[in-house]
Amino acid sequence: MFASRGDDFRPGSGRQARVFPAAVKQTEVRVDAPVRLQWSADGWMLKMMGRLCFAHKTALAPMVRVGTLPMRLLALDYGADIVYCEELIDIKMAQCERVVNDVLETVDFVAPDERVMFRTCSKEKGRVVFQMGTADPERALVVAKLVENDVAAVDVNMGCPKEYSTKGGMGSALLSDPEKIEAILSTLVNGISKPVTCKIRILSTLEDTVNLVKRIEKTGVAAIAVHGRMKEERPRHPVHCDYIQAVAESVSIPVIANGGSSDIVKTFEDIEKFRAAAGASSVMLARAAMWNPSIFRQQGALSVEEVMEDYIRYVISLLCMSVFCMSVLCSEVFGMTDFYNKTKAELEARKAALQTNGDQTEQPTHEDDLITMPVRFERRDYPPQITPKMYLLEWSRKEKLDQPVYETEQRTQDRAFQSTVIIDNKKYRSALWEKSKKFAEQAAAIVCLRTLGLPEGRIGEEHSGLVNKRKRDDKKCAALDDSESAARKRHTSEVPQEEEEEMICRTKVVNGVCGQTTR
């Protein structure tokens, strides 16, 4: 038996081994157990490992704003063998931190501004391909190493013709720089343990396309996905199956055909028609799957309404939409209120259990004279006219201490802010970065107040002197005439404004790196 790279053989499957041209060196292997085999024409060592196989597969193509976790899981449910995430830019991913989300049971890659750039879970771990946009070998390797333990393979986007990709030298811009292609792919192949692939578009001539894929194959990639259109062409143009077929005949690794959604693939049976027409090993679907991901179902596609309900279930379970939008969708559109409420209760119970079992994420950390805590200022948690900074200022006056001084650092890569409040010769800071300077200062004040065990003014918090000072008693308000009421309202709003201005005058702002202070 002769095995090609990426072919998946199982005893009794009846699958025939791929026949190679006479010029290609063959290696005989005895297969006694289900294994995935890797082979290359250069005589590389055959690897019997549980690596992702790209031969004889159907895949969900990488699609920006579409290929998020709910869509990927839905495609797997309907029968897709492999799912690609949306293209993620290496510069943004390199700044991310890997965070295990015990509540959602996911692994999140979180940007400095707390946005989740990539979310995955155990259900797709063996079948998800992480696609990145990159034009730099070393940066690509950094990102690949960051995600390699949570994905099945890493793919480099070399086919996207959109400006947001090409303007950085990524996507289809790489097609005119084969040396850079070789550098990126070789660095990844040699630097990570998972299979490396790439997705390209065809070039202006068949000869140039074949020559390029031969160079790509020599880097050691596990497969090549080929979109059968040139970078200038759009979905309205016919797909060039002859180009894909020529590529498949010129290399020994699996070729994944892409681009048949508009012309050929309308049903599940059409997937095999496209594969045969392109002479490819596998098929990748983008638009056809976007329109209805149940096209992967061998039993036939479901109605769009059924698919939308299945999709929304994943969206709710993974909190991939704001609470308001989810509640509107569930109750007013799809009648899934019971599922929404049940899921919400389960997630809240899971979160509470984790906190009860010793989650210390909001415990202060002491380092010399600096105390940090991962907290964020949420304006909706506080009444109008009341802020943590006001509470801290009032406390400092009561204790006859110098007023709080705030030092704020702005991070250059995403323009996020982090503040440190200095009071009584001690420093307090939130470990999280905020989108505005004011919110960063409030977060620092919260850390200080919680560390000292002081009230911070949250809605529902116990009675405090500051609330008495800032807000009028309801009974007294009822007895005031209109003029007195208006005067007191002006006084209530003016006092905190003056105090805010007084504190801001003493704030030191640090731009770029710490230590460069301007007033």
Image: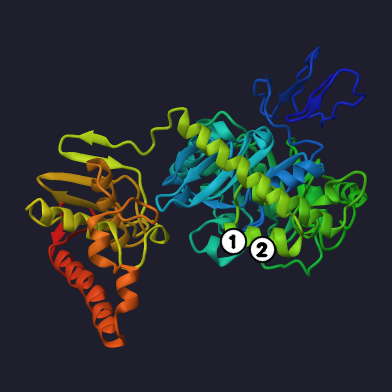
Asked whether disc 1 touches disc 2, contact meaning CB atoms under 8 Å apart, the reply is: yes
Pick whichever, 204 or 310, lies toward us: 310
Q: Dot 2: what SS? A: helix
* Amino acid at pointer 2: Val
In the image, is residue 404 above or below residue 318?
below
Residue 218 found in image quarter: top right
* Amino acid at pointer 1: Phe
What is the x, y in percent for residue 1?
A: 84, 18
Residue shown at 80% from the left, 15% from the top: 31
Pick whichever, 54 or 424, lies toward us: 424
Q: Tag on residue 328?
A: 2
What is the x, y in percent for residue 239?
A: 80, 61
Q: Is residue 245 left or right of residue 473?
A: right
Pick whichever, 230 or 90, lies toward us: 90
Label 2 environment density (alpha carbons within 10 Å; few <14, some 14–19, many ≥20): some
What is the x, y in percent for residue 242?
A: 83, 54
Label 1 environment density (alpha carbons within 10 Å; few <14, some 14–19, many ≥20): few
Q: Is residue 45 left or right of residue 256?
A: left
Residue 512 found in image quarter: bottom left
Residue shown at 74% from the left, 46% from the top: 74
What is the x, y in percent for residue 456?
A: 29, 52
Q: Is residue 249 left or right of residue 396?
A: right
Q: Tag on residue 54?
A: none
Real-space Cα separation, disc 1 to disc 2, in angstroms: 6 Å
Residue at the disc numbered 1: 324
